[in-house]
Image (cartoon, coloured by chain):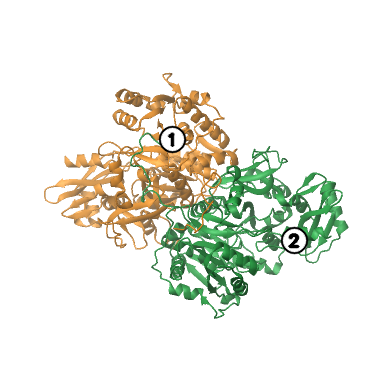
Chain colours: A green, B orange
Amino acid sequence: MGWMADESGLDKCAANFVPLTPLSHLRRAAQVFANRTAVICGSHTATYSEYYDRVTRLASGLVALGVQPGDVVATVIPNVTAQIEASFGVPACGAVLNTINTRLDADTVAYIFDHGGAKVVLVDTQFLPVVEDALARMDGPAPTLIECPDVDAGFPATGRHQTYDALLASGSADFDWIMPQDEWESLSLNYTSGTTGRPKGVVYHHRGAYLMTMGTVVSWRMVLHPVFLAIVPLFHCNGWNHTWMMPLVGGTVVGCRDVSAKAIYDAIGDHGVTHFGGAPIVLNLIVNSAAADQRSFDHTVEVFTAGAPPAPATLAAIGQMGFNVTQVYGLTETYGHVTECLWNADWDPLPQDDRAAIQARQGVAFPMMERVNVVDDKNQQIAQDGTTQGEIVMQGNAVMKGYLKNPAATAEAFEGGHFHSGDIAVQHPDGYIQIADRKKDIIISGGENISSVEVESCLMAHPAVSLCAVVAKPDDKWGEVPCAFIELLDGHTATEAEVIAFARERLAGFKTPKAVVFQDLPKTSTGKIQKFELRQKARSL
Amino acid sequence: MGWMADESGLDKCAANFVPLTPLSHLRRAAQVFANRTAVICGSHTATYSEYYDRVTRLASGLVALGVQPGDVVATVIPNVTAQIEASFGVPACGAVLNTINTRLDADTVAYIFDHGGAKVVLVDTQFLPVVEDALARMDGPAPTLIECPDVDAGFPATGRHQTYDALLASGSADFDWIMPQDEWESLSLNYTSGTTGRPKGVVYHHRGAYLMTMGTVVSWRMVLHPVFLAIVPLFHCNGWNHTWMMPLVGGTVVGCRDVSAKAIYDAIGDHGVTHFGGAPIVLNLIVNSAAADQRSFDHTVEVFTAGAPPAPATLAAIGQMGFNVTQVYGLTETYGHVTECLWNADWDPLPQDDRAAIQARQGVAFPMMERVNVVDDKNQQIAQDGTTQGEIVMQGNAVMKGYLKNPAATAEAFEGGHFHSGDIAVQHPDGYIQIADRKKDIIISGGENISSVEVESCLMAHPAVSLCAVVAKPDDKWGEVPCAFIELLDGHTATEAEVIAFARERLAGFKTPKAVVFQDLPKTSTGKIQKFELRQKARSL
């Protein structure tokens, strides 16, 4: 406790204490980067001065709609201009931003509206039907709906609702932003994907988002003026906080409505994209892209990948295509990524496969995190031997306030003074963490734990496999056995027996899949494979 | 106020709130950069693992000496290993670091010991005489003296005191650091140079130093693993917080006991230095260095300069020698630099002289600062026309807690909710600040304000001038007139009449110096010219 014997007159005041908030980044950028390009999306481009102006009008327009500080404003929009602007425009009027997954069904959206209590919802025209349906299903008062047309993408205004542009036009560019008076005030509300039961509402504080942006600049080797492609949906951990970070470094956000290899290559070729994040499935898109969709470029594109451990085979392939991939790891509860597979130059001379195997590790804590450990059932640090398994737990400033209106779940998540991730991992002797599995994805066969991730990594090395998922299949003798679901590469074939033989050569017998199914894999909007669906299917095989 | 209607269970806890402190950077670096070089000084080198170990032993040794959290530990050491390690070792035991200027007289050092109440003082062998003298002059209890020999530099232990190495050997590498429980706790105590009256003790908080390091990484275009040369004395604003920043980016600190062009070039040539900070006088050392002292290098060295506005002629010259200079500005009260002359690529095509003139501006706020404005007597923003003058005022998280045991001076400095810098500046239409003068350095002649900085910039362009300072000389007719003191370049000559004629061609008549004196200029240890001495001399001319 570093309090001096006499601290009279040394208290906080307006001169020396300003609550941390990502809003400060855009206020500064509007001055110091006024004429630099802030946003590019379709035919829309805006300088920082113009971006600030539009964000201010949005905040002002929301106030005119009756939004009060602490109220929730929801969005159902892909990564286009309105969604990017809402990152700042909603908190700039003191409101809490609730970005909703565009792939949810009307019933779940209605639940989120009721639970979060949104006063206003901004909706992309493409998603009006599901939102209108959701409004009809609500129990409580419905939010005011503002329609966000996207003419470039073929979604002109329907005429049924006030439009986003009209809302901006109604707002004042002289509106004074309502800045947080306490950095612990709520900034955003992100519902978990909730594979079982209702989704939980994760609440972020301004402080955490500010520190997340500061730490990410360091870890992502970012100097001034990066060009960032928004692939990770902004409704997923607020896009890992990357739109909040861009004004800090005077960068450009390039919107991305639909993710495809062609869209990524075009953004690199047309706008000079230097950075993007994405699930491993995005890496697969690039690796498996048609030559006609590819564009040449002469810089290295820095890529953060997370959401599931990428297969070493994928990492090895994309590394040769001009992309430097860093595996990162985190959860909705941690604002996105909080560990990174920080590269050590000592590894440079290793064979490509060994390097890819290291790149598949989740690594070490980001700068803004205090501790990321792996612990046993008694909250004790496990042996760092690359073999012993435990649960990843975290302490740091990029951890949520808690779950909205769910103190019991919050207390459980923070039990023992750590955030419990629910992910099972080993820790290597150098401290690097590597996820073995989600707690619920572990397959227990004859009393042995099988990491579904390990089996998947093995199968991904098969030359015909594009994507795969391994889940538990109930078994009378062993309790559970591994069952593999596989998407094949275009033009390739494989048989169940061949895949099993391939795995048997590389894995212990009890880890080898006992059944193989070839099919398209069900995925969430963020590219995570929906294993719960596959688990149901495996049960009936 | 972004508080939601129901925030039950959303409070801070150990999982989601960790007090901000630069100590966290070194704890993380000891894990993630364990085998990278952290410190190089003379024959000493240490990896992050070793650095952490030594810092921990220092903290443990201080506790064994009776140091309690909140106690003050002073240092009187140049920028060598012990001083670098004290940056972390002192706060790691909860104590407050009081780095004392090595050039002070015994009487002032005694005042600082008494006022700050140091329990322990670490003293470089070279400075033992003045410190021993100071201890004898104290009113209150004397601190325990630990001697820090520097054999490389010709200062072996005297045998009169316990040595730094013995203190480290007595400490435990298993000592648990005492981390702040509140980020507002006091981290360090820095006495102002106090050109009039007793120096004031500026108190820094952990939060400010943490945010200073985060913001500086962005502004200094720093990616991982910079090599930083410690030229700015660590007793000056804790070296602009740069030693606290290095572990964040896995960088190397290169110590520098005596600053010379040869030492700088050798550090670049031998260790690959990429970044350093220094007063304009350091730039002059390089520009005027002998060819024999220079080394060739093929990267750009990034330099922050501050302390006084550098002359455009100096900036123009050094820009051609492989150094990219960014002018920054700040005060002891603001942890060092809080504005930067952020470069705009639109200025690249300008003629060299015009670019140097822009580089001489103090610029815009760093990312961790909320507002840096120029205001009139009524605290109102002045016109941003490049002509109207006002006082620079600041709000942000890199502003001191206040002055130790001096609530009246603290209240005056923070009057109106801003920190008042005492510096007079104009603001250009793009918001960039340019200092006209210190309030007390303004020369008022016939009712007109004359910026001493403007006159100095003019004289620096004279081919024979190495360094100059312009102060007020009392004058019966005009009240005050400008008087110039000049250091000539080796082998050059000039006369008073010639210099006055040179200035008269370039400045308005009332701004032209009425007297010119050729002499060595008195400087503080940080390279600031001591104008108060010159002012006294000008009075007697």
Q: Pointer 2: residues within 10 angstroms few (<14), some, or many (20+)?
A: some
The residue sitting at the bottom extreme is: A159
Q: Residue type at mark 1: give it.
A: Asn
Chain of the residue displaying label 2:
A
Q: Tell me the residue at 15%/54% (across/down).
A: B446
Q: How many marks?
A: 2
Residue with the mark numbered 1: B79
Residue B71, image quadrant: top left
Residue with the mark numbered 2: A533
Viewer-closest of B8 and B484: B8
Q: Nearer the viewer, mark 1 or mark 2?
A: 2
User: Is residue A202 shown left or right of residue B192?
Assistant: right
In the picture, the quarter occupied by the C terminus of chain A is bottom right
Q: Residue B471, position in %: x, y? A: 23, 46
User: Label 1 vs label 2: CA separation?
Assistant: 62 Å
Image mark for residue A199:
none
Q: Residue B304, position in %: x, y? A: 42, 48
Viewer-closest of B441 and B318: B441
User: Is residue A13 shown left or right of residue A1?
Assistant: left
Q: Residue type at mark 2: give it.
A: Glu
Q: Pointer 1: residues within 10 angstroms few (<14), some, or many (20+)?
A: many
Q: Residue B523, position in %: x, y? A: 31, 39
The residue sitting at the top extreme is: B159
Is the Cβ of the residue at disc 1 closer than 8 Å to that at disc 2? no
Q: Is residue B120 visible?
A: yes
Q: Residue B486, position in %: x, y? A: 27, 44
Mark 2 residue element:
helix
User: Is residue A26 shown left or right of residue A264?
Assistant: left
Chain of the residue displaying label 1:
B
